[in-house]
Image: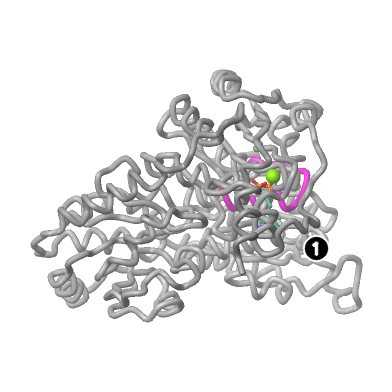
Amino acid sequence: MKKVMNGAQAVVECMKREGVEHVFCVPGESYLPLMDSIYESGDIQLISTRHEGGASFMAEAYGKATRKPGVAMATRAVGGANLAIGIHTAYQDSTPMVVFLGQVHSKFRGREGFQEVELDRFFGHIAKWTVEIKDAERMPELVQRAFRIAKSGRPGPVVVALPEDVLVAEAEMSFGPVAPVPKPRPGASEVAAIEQLLANAKRPLILGGGGVIAADGEQALLKLAEALNIPVMAAFRRHDIFPNNHRLYVGHSGLGTFSPILDTLGQADVVLVVGTRLSEVTTQDYGIFPQNPKLIHIDIDAATLGKSYSPDLGVVADAREALEALLDMNVTCMWEEWAKERREAYELAGEGIAKEEYAVDNREIIRIMQEVLSEDTMITNDAGNFAGWLHSFYSFNRPKTYIGPTSGAMGYGLPAAIGAKVASPGKTVVSLSGDGGFMMTVQELETAARYNIPVIALVFNNSMYGTIRMHQEIHYPERVIGTDLGSVNFAELGTALGVQSVRVETNEDFKEALARAVASNAPALIEIMTNPERISVQSTISSIREKAKHRV
Ligand SMILES: Cc1ncc(C[n+]2csc(CCOP(=O)(O)OP(=O)(O)O)c2C)c(N)n1
Ligand SMILES: [Mg+2]
């Protein structure tokens, strides 16, 4: 059926067909008709943020939480440049996302018009697909294609540039069907080949990543692991693929992972890799398989296979479909001892870490979170060493409870919490950030306050870019430059931005503040004053300096 409408209305019609309920933006005059069409539609909520970086992180986390494309909007080159970090994160994290950018009037294009840039080329390298729509009549076709590309195969961000005149031009529009996401299943011969490889395994391991989450494959993974008695490890920042309190969970391969956990990867002789691109971090600088185990790699994207490691068997399939298909295998499991041993290694890995002689002990903070928060609380995370304690000591026992950027983008935690909370209003959502990362998107506290989005933001304040300081002390001991930060009172800042905020200086005060924040059901900020000397889970500034003295 054809309908006459303008370009902006066609974009909104596509969004409605895709089930878009929220869009995140900073407004701009270049795409006012689109904002007005959203106003007219009545059933899409427009969340206007304080910075496009915040908007894009919100949309990206919304996409992660719903597995549907998150939508962000911004104006021309300036808004586009600001939201690039969220596009890059969606790319690295394989998150479905569609970004609409206002573009210069077609008549002015190519003259370096006001805020003009070739947006499709600008984003070409960090987006899955980019397009500038030049003809209003093609709006439905191209916008629907944008959504199709964002969510199918390896999901990712798509950037759509919308010239000012095309948004207001009327045309007879015809809309196609909404694309279902293809879910390829492994063929019988592929399942047989996997069966064969596992039949000869002595120390098999499953290494799962974001593809398991995207495919809603957590239950299938649990069933398969239990049926075969194979231990499971999570890829970088994908802890929630498998219950961490389960006897078969053997840890997470990330930054600062304890070596006994990494030994599991080193010792495995057959690794079933499911839904992870085997990133630099997950593979510990492409060094996790010193023994050259047999590698079975299952991924939705053929281009991912062989990108980091050449697998003995590469299978293009949806993670859940594949895991379910593998349940039909006929494999005798004799790996109970191995699984038990690796679980013990995981459980004991952090035992040696000394208790902190400081009023705030980050490990205790994580334990308190575990005690106070319900198991289905969603945790979002920023980038920084504070996260080491979360990654090492928090037990993610339920699926869809962790949202963190594998891109390592600072400033992610708070806006991601806002996006996740909008996606899952029934869940408690808590973000963790360092003082450095938090300051990059702190202004979104006001967004949370304005829309009453009750997220709980934790800020670990050590008045420094701690992570970089750690690397600096390792490589250039006692030569501190650029990593010290001023002392900011985040509790006062949060209060000024309209959020109930408190500074805590002891573990006990944190516990009380967290319980209060959960009960309040309003946006809340808890600033935690940490020990600047305790630079990471496994080191202090003095211990690094001491080590350096003995280095030749
Ligand atoms: C956008 C961005 N800029 C810079 C970096 C490099 N970087 C990684 S961690 C870090 C410091 C983080 O400091 P903070 O948030 O205070 O956490 P801390 O390490 O002190 O716990 C920096 C600058 C990054 N990952 N992302
Ligand atoms: Mg810091």
Q: Position of residue 261 (x, y in %)?
A: 37, 55
Q: Amino acid at mark 1?
A: Arg
Q: What residue lies at 36% left-to-right and 55% top-to-bottom?
A: 260
Q: Which residue corresponds to mark 1? A: 76
Question: Picture coordinates of residue 184 (x, y %)?
Answer: 32, 68
Q: Nearer the viewer, residue 417 or 34?
A: 417
Magenta stretch: includes residue 150: no
Q: In which quadrant of the rendered view does residue 47 lie? A: top right
Specify whether residue 100 is in view. Answer: no
In this picture, is 412 found above or below 164? above
Q: Quadrant of ligand 2?
A: top right
- Residue toward you, 260 or 199: 260
534 relative position to 300: left or right:
right
Q: Is residue 58 magenta?
A: yes
Residue shown at 54% from the left, 55% from the top: 69
How many dots with numbers? 1
Question: Looking at the image, is 534 positioned above or below residue 377?
Answer: below
- The reply, left or right, for residue 21 in relation to residue 254 is right
Q: Secondary structure at mark 1?
A: helix
Q: Can you give x and y, in whole percent of width and height, for residue 113 in the image?
A: 91, 71
Q: Quadrant of the C terminus?
A: bottom right
Residue range (magenta): 44-61
The reply to whether residue 161 is visible in this rendering is: yes
Q: Nearer the viewer, residue 72 or 351?
A: 351
**x, y (%) of residue 11?**
65, 58
Mark 1 vs ligand 1: CB under 8 Å?
A: no
Query: Residue sitting at 41 percent across and 62 percent down?
Result: 181
